[in-house]
Image (spheres, rainbow, N blue to C red):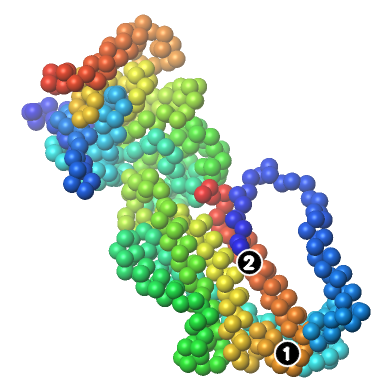
Amino acid sequence: MAQPIAIERPEAAAPRRLDWLPFILPGVLLSAWALLSHTGHVPGYVLPSPGRLVLSALDFVLGKWHLDAYSGTFLQHAAASLQRVALGFALAALAGVLCGLLTGCSPHARRLLDPSVHAVRAVPGIGWLPIAMVWFGVGTRTAVFLIALAAFFPIYVNAALGARTVRPLWLRAARMLGASQRDLFLTVTLPAGLPATAEGLRLGLGVSWAYLVLGELTGVPDGLGAVMMDARMNGQVEVILTSMLAIAGMGRLSDLLLVALFRRVLPLHPR
Amino acid sequence: MDSAFLQSCHIVVHQAGKYYPGHGGGEGLWAVRDLTLCARPGEFAAVVGPSGCGKSTLLSLLAGFEQATEGKVMLEGRPVSGPGPDRGVVFQEDALFPWLTVLGNVCYGLHRRGVSRPEARDEAMRFLHLVGLEEFADYYPSQLSGGMRQRVALARVLANRPRALLMDEPFGALDALTRMEMQQLLLDVWQKLNVTVLFVTHDVEEAIFLADRVYVMTARPGRVLRRVEVGLPRPRTPDTYTDPALTRLRHEVLDLLLEARNPSVLSDAIYPY
């Protein structure tokens, strides 16, 4: 669940000391895992030992040991996945922000768009997989379609919310200062609705990564999701786990980048 | 009402009324009715009245946010049709744009008129200097105190060189000391710019201290009960507060306010000309 973006105050910085409490649980689980693997209680084809996992991960990226067919192919697959997420998210962001803001500030637009959007939204994203494959075949287009479709809704809903919560007083003040209808939208509604829209974009990005995996399960030639399915069929459990970790890492990194971008664009904006 | 008299008024409200229809077939109400007042060019006029008397509606009509149901609302002989920079409004609450800096806020009106960035910046800085905030140009409103924010609001409106300045209880949310500072600042700025001011407030002393004439409104539906001329010498200073003339005026206005709440008085309302 996305955390709200904190408002930075110059004097707020607390002294930096590492909080050890969160590390207890993972530490315990890691130890248990190592123990179970080492004693043979859990067979290697169900859960590889931590050591094997690390080795496999390194080989996946660096390709030095040629442990399996995926050796050294990490970058290529990660790039393919990233491209799909980027494209799908970009489409969803454009459509979602525009439609959402319009819906939020125009009752006519709302009556026009909202019912249809929510009707489509009633079908869970996963349910679109079969028809997407019929329309777009097996490939990148299906993945991008699913990502864009799923990410659109949180972006749209939050952008609409942002536009709706623009204070009428600001609109009055802007009109008094000589703003036209177009000015009102561009210079008041848009910036005022930005914090809520930003939250929607963060949610949309998270959803994008989730639907990436769905989209790639259909049998695309490359991508981390495809690697996961392929590795399952070949019994390469380490590769499955490595791919999962990679997706998680890339998802988290992209979220941090997005938040950093917002911090620069939305300074000290009270909600 | 003769046209010669009309010419001498900068702001005219003549027998104006504003009716709000009721919800779902219920009874509507007249916020103001038969409201008449006149402010001469460059004059400082204050409006006081009991709560709910329609002071804010009056301002809203003059600002052009709402249209009068009947009667005339005019500035410089022309009817008011919608909001615009010629009638600058300083609101009671914080109406600054939080996503813009202080400078950005003050430049807003200028940019809408197509003034170039460097020119607008210079103009804005000039007015920020006038209100004493030129050092805070790059700050955001959330970093400023209430008094400072109202100063920015004032600068933002003045930068567009309005013909009339409409103020809706602008200092109501400020503490006593800040309020006095702001009153002094407003008077200084008003004297320099020679703009007509209509100042709505519930603070009788503030109204007398600031204005040339005080309009006392009746309870809803609001109309003008009486106009009180404030003859206190200018420039007004903190010493003016101790002037016995101010105390006499305060009593006079307070008595009028008591009358204003009494319904029997309404039929005897005297036209303030």
**What's the residue at 42%, 76% (across, down)?**
A120
Give the chain of mark 2.
Answer: A
The tag on residue A171 is: none
View extreme (left): residue = B2
Q: Amino acid at mark 1?
A: Ala
> Does residue B196 appear anywhere in the picture?
no
- Which quadrant holds residue B106? top left
Q: Reply above or below: B76 against B204.
A: below
Q: In the rendered image, which quarter is residue A9 located in?
A: top right
| Chain for disc number 1 | A
Q: Earlier in the sequence, mark 1 or mark 2?
A: 1
Q: Residue furthest front?
A: A41
Task: State how far apart marks 1 and 2 are (Cα).
Answer: 27 Å
SS state under label 2: helix
> Residue B123: percent from the left, percent from the top?
43, 42
Residue A255's disc is 2
Is the N terminus of chain A in the top left, top right, bottom left or bottom right quadrant? bottom right
Q: Are marks 1 and 2 in contact (CB under 8 Å)?
A: no
Q: Nearer the viewer, residue B61 or A159?
A: A159
SS of the residue under disc 1: helix
Q: Choose top left, top right, bottom left or bottom right for residue B206.
A: top left
Q: Residue at x 65, y 71 (%)?
A: A251
Q: Is residue A171 left or right of residue A130?
A: left
Circle nearer the viewer, 1 or 2? 1
* Left or right position of A168 against B150: left
Three-letter amino acid code at the position of disc 2? Asp
Q: Position of residue B193 (x, y in %)?
A: 35, 31
Badge 1 is on which residue?
A231
Q: Which percent across, then down, holds residue B68?
A: 18, 40
